[in-house]
Every structure is written in structure tokens, then in C-alpha cells.
Image (tube, grey):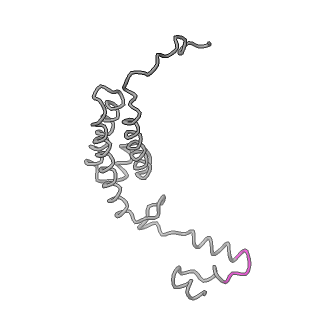
């Protein structure tokens, strides 16, 4: 067991540890990850992750813009979301360096920006179903916006 563990992970003490101290030392050794080829937050090789990130962002922003085409031009959601998404898509196309792109987008790490784009795409699709640009079904009460009531 120890030799198999050593071959796969380079660690010997984890499977055969008897004392808590040895277990702690083994876990500490497991937590050490080489920083040369890895991004700290995800532990994936940078080049592959970043290439996929750029492709994913371009795809998501393009899909958002396609979905927004189904919303009337005068709807506020379409105007502002289209403006922001177009700006971000232009940034992704223009900036090949991920760190600089993260700084320009000001949305956190690239993974967070992808998550935000996924959420925006989901919201845009829901907005088409909800149709908030249409008139209200019932008139709102006259004192709806008065405070205190």
C-alpha cells in the first residue's frame, strides 16, 4: 500500500501512519502544490484553463446578445445589458492576457466573470418569459410608493 501511494503521490506516510503527528505531516505534504504551472484558485494548468475561459466568455457574451435580440429595443433591460455585454465582449476579444482582462472587467477572477455571464444569460432568458416591458395587468394602488403608510 505504501509503495503504491508513493508511486502515485510521492508520499509514503499517509496510508501507514500510526500517530496523529504523522497524519498531520502527511496532510501538510499533500497540501503543497507546485506553483509554477498552476493557477492558485483552481489548480488547473494556466494555458488550458485560460484558453477555455476566453472561448467560454466569448460564447456566453454572444449568446446573451442573441437572447437580447428577442427583447424589444426600448426595454431598459435590453439597452443596458446589451451595452455592458458588448463592452465586455470587446474587452475579451482585445485582451489576450488573463490578468489584465480580469483587471479591466473588474469582476474578480476569470472564473467569477464566467459565472456572472452564465447568470446573466439565465436571467435574459427568464426576462423573455416574464416580459417586464409589457403594461401591468392591474393598476397599482395609489399609495404604493408613499411612506409611511
Q: Nearer the viewer, residue 24 or 110?
A: 110
Was residue 83 drawn as part of the magenta stretch in this picture? no
Q: Nearer the viewer, residue 129 or 3?
A: 129
For the C terminus, which image quadrant? top right
Image check: 102 left or right of 62? right
Which residue sits furthest right?
A: 19
Estimate the x, y position of residue 51 in percent, counting from the top left. Answer: 32, 59
Q: Nearer the viewer, residue 48 or 138?
A: 138
Residue beneath the point at 33% across and 32% down: 78
Which residue sits furthest top?
A: 142
Image check: 89 left or right of 43? left
Asked if residue 20 is positioned above or below residue 48 in the image, the reply reads below
Image check: 51 left or right of 15? left
Estimate the x, y position of residue 73 in percent, counting from the top left. Answer: 27, 28
Res 66 quadrant in image? top left
Res 5 quadrant in image? bottom right
Residue beneath the point at 71% across and 75% down: 21
Estimate the x, y position of residue 55 in percent, counting from the top left. Answer: 30, 55
Asked if residue 8 is positioned above or below residue 71 in the image, the reply reads below
Estimate the x, y position of residue 92 in percent, counting from the top left. Answer: 30, 48
Residue beneath the point at 59% across and 13% down: 147
Asked if residue 46 is positioned above or below residue 127 in the image, the reply reads below
Residue beneath the point at 48% across and 69% down: 34
Image check: 117 left or right of 14? left
* The magenta segment: 16-21
Was residue 17 drawn as part of the magenta stretch in this picture? yes
Amino acid at each position: 500500500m505504501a509503495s503504491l501511494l508513493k508511486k502515485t503521490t510521492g508520499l509514503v506516510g499517509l496510508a501507514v501512519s500510526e500517530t496523529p503527528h504523522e497524519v498531520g505531516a502527511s496532510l501538510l505534504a499533500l497540501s503543497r502544490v507546485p506553483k509554477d504551472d498552476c493557477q492558485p484558485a483552481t489548480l488547473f494548468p494556466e494555458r488550458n484553463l485560460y484558453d477555455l475561459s476566453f472561448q467560454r466568455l466569448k460564447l456566453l457574451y454572444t449568446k446573451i446578445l442573441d437572447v437580447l435580440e428577442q427583447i424589444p429595443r426600448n426595454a431598459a433591460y435590453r439597452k443596458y445589458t446589451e451595452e455592458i455585454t458588448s463592452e465586455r465582449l470587446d474587452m475579451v476579444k482585445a485582451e489576450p492576457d488573463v490578468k489584465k482582462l480580469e483587471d479591466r472587467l473588474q469582476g474578480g477572477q476569470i472564473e467569477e466573470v464566467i459565472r456572472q455571464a452564465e447568470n446573466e444569460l439565465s436571467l435574459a432568458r427568464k426576462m423573455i418569459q416574464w416580459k417586464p416591458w409589457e403594461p401591468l395587468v392591474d393598476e397599482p394602488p395609489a399609495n404604493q410608493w408613499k411612506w409611511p403608510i
